[in-house]
């Protein structure tokens, strides 16, 4: 799918700020009728008539107050431009898990935010701080991959490894160890992105698909907007924490609510190419005249060291701001669950907590 054809029906919003009423017109009418009747009666007693005068109309004040109180400022990015004003990051407070499964209570987990749902029915099993945008680290790469698949002309698109991609091989970043001058196909680069969580692959893909990291981040934001994920915002293509920032959102970098991240994962897992990649444990790419030999192993221990029966993906993440994160999906018998834990205190804890949530979610269906 080409850039020009993708999301043709989606408005090109390029970072403009809109104030959108968070209430229906019917509800406004119902809520303001008492005001209208009272003011109309008073006016008719005094003047015997009721005239509309635009902004001075007696209904305008309550309506204006209502709309002013119930508006949501939404900043959307389009036309390949990066989001200029990301979502503000509210302070996250630990809350008691909200569960809809009768019987056994949900397991105790250390995550600052979590969400678990039935991918087939949409039933929400667990919600902990699930509507609050938080830092998401390399789980960002779910969107990086999805945007690359949607906005590239082909999965055979050449991805040449430039100096900006190789420069990611510093400061302990997670990388695929791509070599300067090598050329991969986009499909091969997606393995480098999603298995070892290559920041270098994220940069190379962004350059190949959109021409720059900034423009590709704009495509990621456009994709989030088109999917209705209003608590999701991207400043970069890899998920790294920004070096500095003048406000909370820029300091935290890429952010999403737990719910929105699960909804994105559910959508991404419906794509056969994406699903095939994130379910892979090891991918070996033999050397050719276009590139050297590579071998990449997944960072998702539920597929390897802490193997969970029925696991199908999806993506790990870790930065100082985000803590340890994991988006996961698993199936057992006739049930498929997708979830996330964000802000875990340890690397191992994210896998242990995810497995505990899956065991609880599958309930009696899951063999001991």
Image: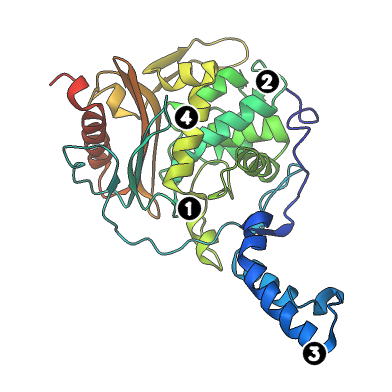
Q: Earlier in the sequence, mark 3 or mark 1?
A: 3
Near-viewer residue (126 or 41):
41
Q: CA distance from mark 1 to mark 4?
A: 25 Å
Q: Position of residue 165 (x, y in %)?
A: 58, 36
Near-viewer residue (37 or 274):
37
* Residue 26 occupies quadrant: bottom right
Mark 4, Cα crowd under 10 Å, few <14 / some 14-19 / many 20+, is many
Residue 266 image label: 4
Q: Secondary structure at mark 4?
A: helix
Residue at (48% x, 24% y) in the render:
269
Residue 34 vertical placement versus 123 (above, below): below
Residue depth check, mark 1 versus mark 4: number of the one nearer the observer: 4
Residue 158 image label: 2
Image quarter where the C terminus lies is top left
Find out whether the residues at labels 1 and 4 contact each other: C-beta distance under 8 Å: no
Residue 46 image label: 3
Q: Earlier in the sequence, mark 1 or mark 4?
A: 1
Q: Earlier in the sequence, mark 3 or mark 2?
A: 3
Q: Position of residue 56 (x, y in %)?
A: 81, 80
Residue 41 vertical placement versus 252 (above, below): below
């Amino acid at each position: 799918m080409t850039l020009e054809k993708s999301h043709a029906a989606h408005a090109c919003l390029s970072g403009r700020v809109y104030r959108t009423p968070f209430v229906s017109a019917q509800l406004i009418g119902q809520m303001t009728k008492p005001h209208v009747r009272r003011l109309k009666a008073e006016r008719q007693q005094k003047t015997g008539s009721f005239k509309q005068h635009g902004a001075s109309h007696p209904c305008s004040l309550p309506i204006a107050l209502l709309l002013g109180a119930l508006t949501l400022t939404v900043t959307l990015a389009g036309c390949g431009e990066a989001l200029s004003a990301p979502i503000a990051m509210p302070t996250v407070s630990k809350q008691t898990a909200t569960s809809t499964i009768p019987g056994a209570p949900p397991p105790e987990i250390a995550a600052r935010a979590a969400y678990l749902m039935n991918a087939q029915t949409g039933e929400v099993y667990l919600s902990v701080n699930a509507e609050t945008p938080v830092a998401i680290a390399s789980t960002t790469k779910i969107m990086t991959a999805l945007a690359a698949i949607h906005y590239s002309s082909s999965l055979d698109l050449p991805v040449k490894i430039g100096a900006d991609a190789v420069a990611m091989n510093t400061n302990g970043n997670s990388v695929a160890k791509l070599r300067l001058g090598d050329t991969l196909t986009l499909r091969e680069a997606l393995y480098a992105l999603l298995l070892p969580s290559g920041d270098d692959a994220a940069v190379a893909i962004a350059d190949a698909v959109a021409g720059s990291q900034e423009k590709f981040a704009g495509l990621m934001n456009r994709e989030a907007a088109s999917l209705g994920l209003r608590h999701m915002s991207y400043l970069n293509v890899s998920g790294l924490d920004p070096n500095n920032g003048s406000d909370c959102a820029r300091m935290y970098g890429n952010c999403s609510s737990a719910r929105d991240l699960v909804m994105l994962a559910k959508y991404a897992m419906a794509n056969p190419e994406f699903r095939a990649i994130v379910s892979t444990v090891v991918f070996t790419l033999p050397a050719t005249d276009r590139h050297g030999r590579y071998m990449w192993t997944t960072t998702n221990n539920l597929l390897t060291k802490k193997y969970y029966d029925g696991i199908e993906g999806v993506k790990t993440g870790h930065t100082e701001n985000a803590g340890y994160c994991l988006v996961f999906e698993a199936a057992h018998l006739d049930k498929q669950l997708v979830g996330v834990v964000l802000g875990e205190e340890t690397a191992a804890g994210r896998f242990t907590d995810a497995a505990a949530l899956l065991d609880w979610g599958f309930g009696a269906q899951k063999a001991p």
